[in-house]
Image (cartoon, grey):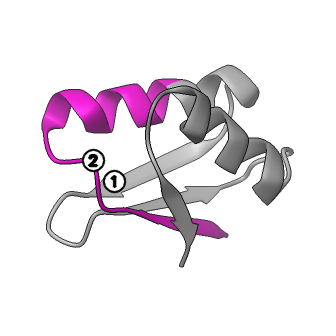
């Protein structure tokens, strides 16, 4: 599992944007978002943590490895 804390993910819309960014890297990834802790967990993914972090950054957010 790869996890990030994305503290600037403050709404369901931003959570959707982060999920979309991850799915663009690997459409089969299982993405769980916890808005209470600003955490994104990604499983069953063939992408690297770096690729996922860069995709989330490209979407306009600031992921930190959790």
- In percent of the image, x 72 and y 52: which residue is there? 44
Number of numbered discs visible in the structure rendering? 2
Give the Cα separation between the discs numbered 1 and 2: 10 Å
Please state the horizontal and vertical placement of residue 56, each as a whole percent of the image. Answer: 56, 39
Q: Examine the image and state in which quarter residue 36 appears.
A: bottom left
Range of magenta residues: 1-20
The answer to whether the residues at label 1 and label 2 have Cβ atoms under 8 Å apart is yes
**Vertical relation: 64 (above or below) 29:** below
Q: Which quarter of the image is occupied by the N terminus?
A: bottom right
**Vertical relation: 61 (above or below) 33:** above
Residue at which label 2 appears: 9
Between residues 13 and 33, which one lies in front from this camera angle? 13
Please state the horizontal and vertical placement of residue 17, each as a whole percent of the image. Answer: 38, 26
Element type where label 2 sits in the image: loop
- In percent of the image, x 20 and y 27: which residue is there? 13
Q: Is residue 59 left or right of residue 29?
A: left
Q: Is residue 66 left or right of residue 1?
A: left
The reply to whether the magenta stretch includes residue 41 is: no
The reply to whether the magenta stretch includes residue 8 is: yes
Of the residues under marks 1 and 2, which one precedes in the sequence? Answer: 2
Please state the horizontal and vertical placement of residue 59, each as a whole percent of the image. Answer: 50, 27
Q: Residue 48 carries which label?
A: none
Q: In this view, does 46 lie to the left or right of 63?
A: right
Between residues 45 and 39, which one lies in front from this camera angle? 39
Element type where label 1 sits in the image: strand
- In percent of the image, x 33 and y 53: which residue is there? 33
Residue at which label 1 appears: 33
Please state the horizontal and vertical placement of residue 23, each as a whole percent of the image. Answer: 60, 27
């Amino acid at each position: 599992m790869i996890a990030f804390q994305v503290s600037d993910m403050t709404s369901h819309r931003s959570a959707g944007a982060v999920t979309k960014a991850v799915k663009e890297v690997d459409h089969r990834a299982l993405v769980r978002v916890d808005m209470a802790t600003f955490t994104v967990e990604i499983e069953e993914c063939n992408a690297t943590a770096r690729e996922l972090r860069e995709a989330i950054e490209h979407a306009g957010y600031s992921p930190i490895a959790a």
